Image (tube, helix red, strand yellow):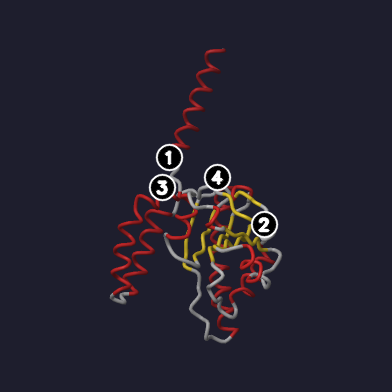
Amino acid sequence: MGRLLLLLFFIYSLSIYSQEVDKVSFSEAVELNIKEYTKKSDIAYYYRDYERGEFLFDSIINNVIKGSYLDNFTVRKRSGRKIELNKFKKPIVLITYATWHTPGKGEIPALNKIAKKHHKEIDFVVLFWDTKKNVRRATRKYSRKINILYVDELENKFDHIVKTMKHSFGMPTTFFIDHDKRIIDVRRTAIHHYSEEFETSFNINYTSFLDGVSLLKLDSQKIVGE
């Protein structure tokens, strides 16, 4: 009986180890593919072949990034206190941003409305790349249902994942991440609507965010069903 239990424990441990080995981190997936993607993407946008540029972006997301696991790293809350990304236990809508980007008229109100409705099921996180002072000044219109975080690169000079997150796909970019930190989709945030009327900008952004939230909820339902 003792030998049987030991054998079953060994098989179980081997299975868990195999699952862990199969996991590919976001930083690893990017590192293996980003040079070729950047080279081709730069050429496409140099010649203003935007359709080709979008095709390349979609290809690397669908074939490389989806299914990878976001690395844990330390950021700061708006208060200045440190927090690890792994502290968020729900599925995450993670938007990488910078204070020098000008949001569309309806972008923040749209995100606020989505977060108000779905914050009990999903963590909404906007991650800025800037100093505490600039971030606090630029984020006054965000709802309290949204977690405002920032990374000050001056204190993260040697953090590989910080560099990877910022420089791989540009900003703003939205990551849809399940509760295990598995990336299920990445999309460029709808930002080209500065001259649009508020209603148009709001509807474009609301639809985009809602589509991503629906994707996360559908993924969670599949996991529960399994």
First in sequence, mark 1 or 3: give its number: 1
First in sequence, mark 4 or 2: give its number: 2
- The local crowd at label 4, few if under 14, some if 14 to 19, many if 20 or more residues have their Cα within 10 Å, is few
Q: Position of residue 202 (x, y in %)?
A: 59, 79
Q: Position of residue 25 (x, y in %)?
A: 45, 46
Residue 226 got which mark?
A: 4
Residue that appears at 43% across and 62% down: 169
Q: Position of residue 190 (x, y in %)?
A: 50, 73
First in sequence, mark 1 or 4: give its number: 1
Q: Look at discs 4 and 2 and give the one toward the viewer.
A: 2
Q: Amino acid at mark 2?
A: Gly
Residue 22 got which mark?
A: 1
Q: Are marks 4 and 2 in contact (CB under 8 Å)?
A: no
Residue that appears at 56% across and 60% down: 94
Residue 220 got which mark?
A: none
Residue wearing tag 3: 28
Q: Look at discs 1 and 3 and give the one toward the viewer.
A: 3
Local secondary structure at mark 2: loop
View extreme (front): residue: 154
Residue that appears at 47% across and 32% down: 17
Q: Nearer the viewer, residue 212 or 123?
A: 123
Q: Amino acid at mark 1?
A: Asp
Tell me the quadrant of the picture where the C terminus can be found: top right
- The local crowd at label 2, few if under 14, some if 14 to 19, many if 20 or more residues have their Cα within 10 Å, is some
Cα gap from disc 3 to disc 4, whole angstroms? 28 Å
Q: Look at discs 2 and 3 and give the one toward the viewer.
A: 2
Q: Nearer the viewer, residue 79 or 204?
A: 79
Q: Look at discs 3 and 4 and give the one toward the viewer.
A: 3
